[in-house]
Amino acid sequence: MKQIWNSFKIAFAMYSKIPMPKSDWTKENMRYTMCFFPAVGLVIGGLTWLWGVWGRNLAESHIFYTVILLLIPVAVTGGIHLDGLLDTSDALSSYQERERKLEILKDSHAGAFAIIIGITYFLLYFGIYSELTLQGLPVVCLSFVLSRCFSGLSIAAFPMAKNTGLAATFSDGAQKQTVRITTVAWGLLTILLMCLYQPLLGACAAIGGMAAFVFYYRMSMKQFGGITGDLAGFFLQICELVMALCVVAGEILLRKMA
């Protein structure tokens, strides 16, 4: 029981800025860390829902309201996954050999393509959230959980591109079968809740998330020979963007069908 509690604390200490009691990052304490990764998404989703519902009455400007929606995940996570998005964008844009791409992932400096992709990403996200209504908001809130289910599953199921780094550390320390079962259970429950709330929007989000997951696997294997922590962060950000886009597309479809 103590190991599980320590794994919970490590999950939130690593993947969020939420203060947690100190825990030793030993192999034993990290066994079940990925099992609690989706719980970070619950916090982000809950805060997003609160602002999404009540912020409309508090914010006089729709632009300010939308910007806060964009920044909630960044505030909770500290931008750890955005770092993976930017590093991976630089590596993919280099068109270098595999080993050179892996070196670029480790480079702490942001290249031109990282900046371009970062700006483009937030502009596109802003446009998507500008079209989001209260009908689709709960599904988008749950998407923060689903994206972390997929990401946690990849750490336990996909080959590692290298034997060093945070992803490899969590993978080596993980009880992989337990993590696979737990993240799949989290994911299925999340998809079920999405579809029970609104079948079409839930299905759109789930299909979008699974499509991003397949792309993530194929791209990682082809370009890098496996996954790293940066690639997992890249996937999570892309997955959330795609799911939000799919929800908005589903909302437009529902309005046309009405």
Image (cartoon, rainbow, N blue to C red):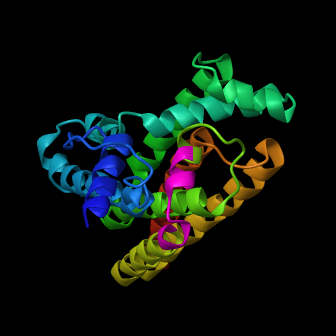
Residue 94 position within the rendered picture, expressed as x and y whole percent measured from the top left: 79, 26
- Residue at horizontal 66%, vertical 17%? 112
Residue 16 position within the rendered picture, expressed as x and y whole percent measured from the top left: 32, 42
Specify the farthest residue to the right: 97
Q: Nearer the viewer, residue 153 or 118?
A: 153
- Residue at horizontal 34%, vertical 60%? 141
Q: Nearer the viewer, residue 58 or 15?
A: 15
Q: Principal SS element in the magenta part?
A: helix
Query: Would residue 214 appear left or right of 155 to someone viewing this image?
Result: right
Q: Nearer the viewer, residue 147 or 250?
A: 147
Residue 218 position within the rendered picture, expressed as x and y whole percent measured from the top left: 77, 56
- Residue at horizontal 71%, vertical 55%? 159
| Quarter occupied by residue 169 | top right
| Quarter occupied by residue 93 | top right
| Residue 194 painted magenta | no
Query: Would residue 36 appear left or right of 212 to someone viewing this image?
Result: left
- Residue at horizontal 65%, vertical 64%? 211
Q: Is residue 235 above or below residue 180?
A: above
Q: Which residues are magenta?
A: 169-179
Query: Would residue 21 appear left or right of 154 to someone viewing this image?
Result: left
Image quarter of the C terminus = bottom left
| Residue 174 painted magenta | yes
